[in-house]
Amino acid sequence: MLKVENISKSFPGIKALDSVSVEFLEGEIHALLGENGAGKSTLIKVICGVHPQDTGKMYIDDKKLVVESYIEALAKDISVVNQELQVFPRYSVAENIMLDKMKTIGKTAILDWKAINKTSKRYLDMVGLDIPPTKAIGELSVAQKQMVEIAKALASNSKILLLDEPTSAISESEIKTLFEILSGLKEKGIIIIFVTHKLEEVFRVCDKVTVLRDGKKIGTKKIEEVERADLVKMMIGREEKIEAFRAGAVEEDNIVLEAEGIYKEHKAEDMSFKLRKGEVLGFYGLMGAGRTELARLLIGEDRKQSGKVYVGGKEINPRSISDSLYKYRIGYVTENRKEEGLLLNSNIKTNVNITIWPMIASKVLKLINGKKEEENARRMVDELDIRATSINQLAQKLSGGNQQKLSISKWLVADCDIIIFDEPTIGVDVGAKEYIHKLIYNLAHEQGKSIILISSDMPEIIKLANRIYIFREKKIIGEIGEVSKDADSYDIVSNQIASYYV
């Protein structure tokens, strides 16, 4: 048994954990739930030695546990899969997996690369990742990097496994593989602590759940003792309000963005679509189906080999994201906020304003107007309810949900006409998710913006989209026109979507 007793941890202006006590038993998958900023990740980091607790103690089987670094945690059979990917991009997959356990030839200091690659391949096979162990990890997708992180944790053969949002960037098939692995580890008596925002995963794989709110423990329940509504109420302190969105008005004949025959080898196969003014257009499919690849071709982040893109009826050829923004008023909220969406080592003010610096700089000296920067940052913090100590707080110090709101804010400040939201609610809590849904709806149907919503969350895309394009194997394989918003719409549309995968 792992026991944390009266653990408290404070950061400047924030009490992240307030006298939290929990018992984690061997052979159980124990979920940690709570809204962004509730203290889940902080507790994980205390257990694995990244953050020292201010007060409180930890025990393993009644023996006091002191962990002062992650290296020390590994030595004590504790490993973690972090929400933030912890990889070395220039190193190989094998080096990333085996970094703390590199094999040498005999008693020499010469690395045994054959053994290193062979061992790492065994763990890659365990997570169902068919890639060469010698490949540079920087060349992998976000989902593949996440699976490598899981393989690395498994390679440690730990007795305590901490999983912080491990499914936030992987596909349903990869999630299924992960849950099969966890079931096997549970049978071996491993203690598994599982942090997630996806309530359906808690009921699918966990034995117990502990809910944190504002740094305090609200309660621990066996999974068979609670319903979804109970957990939501524990998390947010009130009953969940599920708002039904009516079908918004769309200007049918006003095509703001059109793509014809977009092609790039291994990325897009002859893709065509039309986006109307005031519309939420859904791109549905599993990760790797071609949705993000198409988006990046549209905005010039990647170069298409053939095909045409039109904005307002005129052909465009953006060469970069800045081209798309400043010439055509197109914004792109990336699915990878950590590596692409934010400057993590910069503050909120900088991240909010980075897209409009040319617009708020003096014409002669090119000096940025600091007053406007502050006004924009404070407005976005207020409008998006970004929980922060001040606009000078570093982005990396925000919780996942608040980071996502910050990633969105820079495109709202830029007042884009077309915004592509790529998996906008990955890794955010139920409250932040509902907020982002309402934001997307209002942008389209109250402000007249045109939205492309890329999502593998079927309820999300059915709830928000006016029309849905179905993606598979780098192709658009179908379209669902005029998604109904009545009480029976979910079952009807989900069956329509499912029919494309039979």
Image: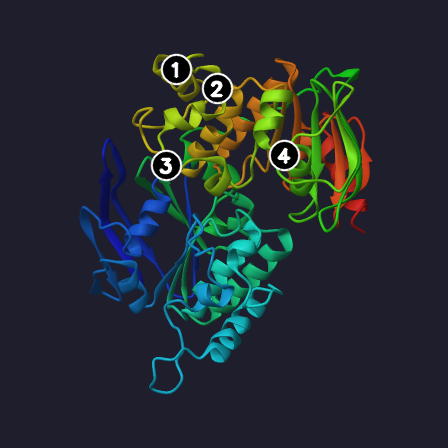
Question: Residue 443 location, x and y as percent?
Answer: 60, 19
In the picture, the quarter occupied by the N terminus is: bottom left
38 relative to 361, above or below: below
Amino acid under label 3? Gly
Residue 346 sits in which quadrant?
Answer: top left
Question: Residue 352 location, x and y as percent?
Answer: 44, 24
Closer to the chain start, of discs 2 and 1, is 2
In the rendered structure, find residue 365 and report the number of the disc placed on it.
1
Residue 173 sits in which quadrant?
Answer: bottom right
276 relative to 205, above or below: above
- Taking the image as shown, residue 368 lies to the left or right of residue 281, namely left
Amino acid under label 1? Leu
Closer to the chain start, of discs 3 and 2, is 3
- CA gap between label 3 and label 2 equals 33 Å
Q: Which residue is mark 3?
A: 37
Q: Which residue is mark 4?
A: 460
Nearer to us of marks 1 and 3 is: 1
Nearer to us of marks 3 and 2 is: 2
Residue depicted at x 56% and y 17%: 415
The secondary element bearing badge 2 is classed as helix
Amino acid under label 4? Glu
- Taking the image as shown, residue 36 lies to the left or right of residue 131, namely left
Residue depicted at x 36% and y 37%: 345
Q: Residues within 10 Å of mark 3 (few under 14, many from 20)?
A: many
